[in-house]
Amino acid sequence: MKKKLIYRLVLTCFIIAIGLIIFRFSSLQANSYRMLERSGPAAQSREWMITRNYASNLQAALKNNPSDIKSALSLATLFIQEARISGNYLYYDKAALKYVNDVIRTDSSNFDALTLKSLIYLSQHHFAEGLQIAERAKQINPYNAFIYGVLVDGNVEMGNYDSAVANSDRMVSIRPDLRSYSRISYLREIYGDYPGAIQAMRMAVDAGAPGDETTEWTRIQLGRLYENTGDLKSAEMHYMIALDERPGYAYAMAGLARIALATADGEKAIAYYKKADSLVSDNSFKEELSDIYQMKGQKSKADSLANLVIRVLSRDAQKGSGDENIGHYADRELAYAFLKVGDYDQALEHALIEYNRRPGNIDVNETLAWVYYCKGEYAKALPYLQVALKTNSKNPLLLCRAGLIYAKNGNKLSAKTTLEQALSSHANFSQAVKNQSSEILKTL
């Protein structure tokens, strides 16, 4: 009897031990992340082979020593970089934040971990939280250029433009490079200085290594600046260079799609957008495809893509609910997506949610003003438009929207001046808004 009891106890302990091992292994598996395979030419590149091997080595180091902070932060950095390359922010933000939070739980004042966490929060559009963490990191190390770049981004998104300029000046004084020059360019654009913005972005491109994703992303931004000033030849040239330096680069294809559309080659534009969409997860490709179909009178295709964007954005936001490692605010994007399908009430709801998060941001105010315009509530649009124009931005789409709102509010002089300024630039932007602006201008 005694032997049977001992046997049962030993067997029970053995089963419990096996269960604990399985549970621990399952937990580790659930919390481990790997690099996902890339698509298209990027999957065959030498860069991808190096990145994948480096990630494997870091994961092996962490398996041998889970408290290896350097390897954890290096792996988080790789995930952050891969998020932009692949467009799979939902997966890679969660992966990166898992390792960053592990480090912070061990060392709450780790500068690199706090900087990366701030960067991830900005990526997820948690701008207020990201800015707060960046300020905390700056107190730990006020001599690091990168943290000032994060502060520039956070302050821009929150509408603190004076603070963004001050942090940009501090950043470039510490380290004049691609990152600091590109932020100077962005701020000059916000303040309406397109020649200065182009000059700084060219310096940023020249400071980078050709073919590197960060360099070619910067080159795409330079192309967009040329598009906004009507220099489509220069824009096309830079998109072609980016595609040559980085074969299969989806954002270069999207740039060439916009150029094709500007020259009335809709089929070529569609082909470029479809190819870009197959390579990178980015809803903007679907949104711009939707616009083309709308222009071509293919309403069902346009609405189908717009509704797909709504479902994807809503799903990703829902997945992040209650999980500290994921969660992407996308209310501004949802506002525009609902406008495309004519659901103005939902568009307004999301525009207001975003406005309540960051009422000083000019882009958010432009969105809310435009939603009110589309709803036919022109007087309500006006105060938000004034905030959207507070930095003297010369963005041609903003100026056209401003002119249309002025016209509907009976301010013919401001409408005429603003619309003429926008249309005379010959910038490459929404043809639908251009057409609407031209028709209104004829009546003024």
Image (cartoon, rainbow, N blue to C red):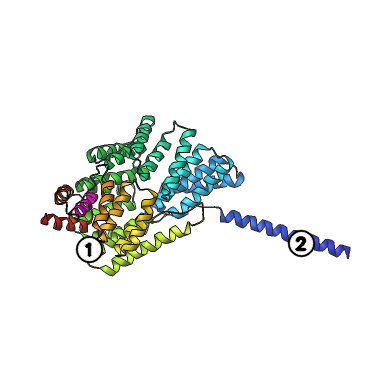
Mark 1 nearby-residue class (10 Å; few <14, some 14–19, many ≥20)? some
Judged by its main secondary structure, the magenta piece is helix
- Of helix, strand and loop, which one carries label 2? helix
Residue 184's quadrant in the figure? Answer: top left
Residue 148: % across, % down: 40, 36
Q: Quadrant of residue 17?
A: bottom right
Tell me the quarter of the image containing the N terminus.
bottom right
Disc ID at residue 243? none
Label ID, residue 295: 1
Q: Position of residue 254 (x, y in %)?
A: 29, 54
Q: Residue at x 30, y 66 (%)?
A: 303
167 vs 300: above or below: above
Q: Split into 4 quadrants, where in the image is the C terminus?
A: bottom left
Residue 414 visible here: yes
Please name the amino acid that badge 1 sits on.
Met
Give the camera-side residue of 176 and 399: 399
Q: Nearer the viewer, residue 334 or 230?
A: 334
Marks 2 and 1 close (CB-CB < 8 Å): no
The residue that appears at 48% across and 57% down in the rendered structure is 321
**Amino acid type, callout 2:** Thr
Q: Is residue 276 in view?
A: no
Q: Residue at x 30, y 61 (%)?
A: 339
Name the secondary structure under disc 1: helix
* Residues drawn in magenta: 392-406
Location of residue 87 in the rendering, given as x and y in whole percent from the top left corner: 40, 53
Q: Which mark is residue 12?
A: 2
Is residue 186 shown left or right of residue 37?
A: left
Q: Is residue 25 left or right of residue 53?
A: right
Q: Position of residue 196 (x, y in %)?
A: 24, 37
For disc 2, the neighbor class at 10 Å (few under 14, some 14 to 19, many from 20) is few
